[in-house]
Amino acid sequence: MHRKTRHLLLFGCLFGPAFASGGERWPDLPVAAKQTAGARVGQFAYAGLGSAGKAWWGLDLSRSDAQWVPLAEFPDQPRDGASAVAVGGQVYVFAGQGKAAPTDKTLTMFDSVYRYEPAANRWSKLPTRMPLGGLAAAAVSLDDREVLFFGGVNKAIFDGYHQDYFVSAAGDAARQEAVAAAYFDQRPQDYLFAAQVLSYEPATNQWRNLGLDPGLPTVGAGAAVSGLQVHLISGEIKPGLRSPEVKSVTLVDGRLRWQSERLPAPAAGVAQDGVAGAYAGYSGKVLLAAGGTNFPGAWKQFLAGRNFAHKGLKKVWHDEIYARVDGGWRLVGRLPQAQAHGAYMPTEDGLLVIGGELQDGAASSAVFELRWNGQGVDIVP
């Protein structure tokens, strides 16, 4: 059933997709958007930023006739890859990348924190900053009190590379090639992705260090929460090289307990190279992971001793849907099209996918839900 507009000013299978019939009809975003942020507060979904600029929209999930409604614009510079997390009925937006001023020639990593108050339809900048930058960290809340951050790009290295490439070497192709070669030809640990797991508590405006990731930290991992456990789906261990692992982290008495599994191969005879920017969440008790990007063959080159693991390889967007069923992962279906790097959030019955990036970087406005049906995944458009 199609959702129709309602004005809201303030808010108080295995080989292809199986399309559900007679279900809810999720409205598309007003514009195609990728690298967006989104979070759910009660019956409302919020999403925006990324390629949508400062736009921020809301959707009443409880109404079958609702449409996305434009809300107060984000008050600072546009940014890609920010993290949005709901805590205590508010939405907190962290980090992201963009231009500090519209006339800048290079990108920077933002370390600012903003709060969106749905009841007042109002943004405010908080008097704090992310200690480690936080771009592409997996950000979640397990208790509706604090936000946990897993991984994240190193701000000094990120900003330095973009300054060297786009400003210092601007207009000189040979110098830019040398800058890129030096940047990508490093080991995973040399990028200093955040191994510290950080906690931020909005009520006290305080940050804490909860401990270290015992493995290689990742950026761009999908994240799904169940109780006091978070699953981190794949992600990059260095630019161009993804991890095939799924990390499970449980918070027990203030301590983190880590476990690790591997995603299965996407097809017979094809290596699992891992993905970045996947969508992740639960449908019932079944954990789903879908989409993402990688450079097929990067692990083969890396294991052959090439730190610049994705050199000469083509970036690929994926449509595989994996599910953790009966204690293990398996391939259970495919998205309507290959995509990654969009907003996502839980619904009552599944995982809501909101826009994203399509093959070769195009943006999508499509919104749909992934629902486990006991055998595979239904796509509810």
Image: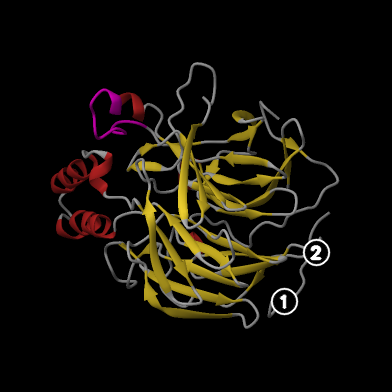
Q: Coloring scheme of the render?
A: secondary structure
Helix, strand or loop for the magenta stretch, by majority: loop
Q: Is residue 364 visible?
A: no
Report the side of 113 relative to 311 (left or right): right
Q: Amino acid at mark 2?
A: Arg
Q: Would residue 171 be counted in the magenta stretch?
A: no
- Along the viewing direction, whichever of 228 and 276 lies nearer the viewer: 228
**What x and y, as percent, mark residue 379?**
72, 41
Label 2: how many Cα within 10 Å (few below 14, some 14–19, many 20+): some
- Label 2 – label 1 distance at C-alpha: 12 Å
**Residue picked out by circle 1:** 8
Q: Secondary structure at mark 1?
A: loop
Residue at 53% in and 27% down:
264
Identify the image quadrant of residue 373.
top right
For label 1, the crowd category at 10 Å Cα-Cα, with few meaning under 14, some 14 to 19 and many 20 or more, is: some
Q: Residue at x 48, y 55 (%)?
A: 35
In the rendered image, the quadrant that contains the N terminus is bottom right
Residue at mark 2 = 63
**Where residue 177 is drawn, which disc sits there?**
none
Q: Position of residue 256 (x, y in %)?
A: 46, 50
Q: Residue flagged by tag 1: what amino acid is it? A: Leu
Which percent across, then down, holds residue 69?
Answer: 67, 70
Which span is picked out in magenta? 302-313
Q: Does residue 278 appear left or right of residue 301 in this picture?
A: right
- Splitting the image into 4 quarters, where does residue 134 fall? bottom left
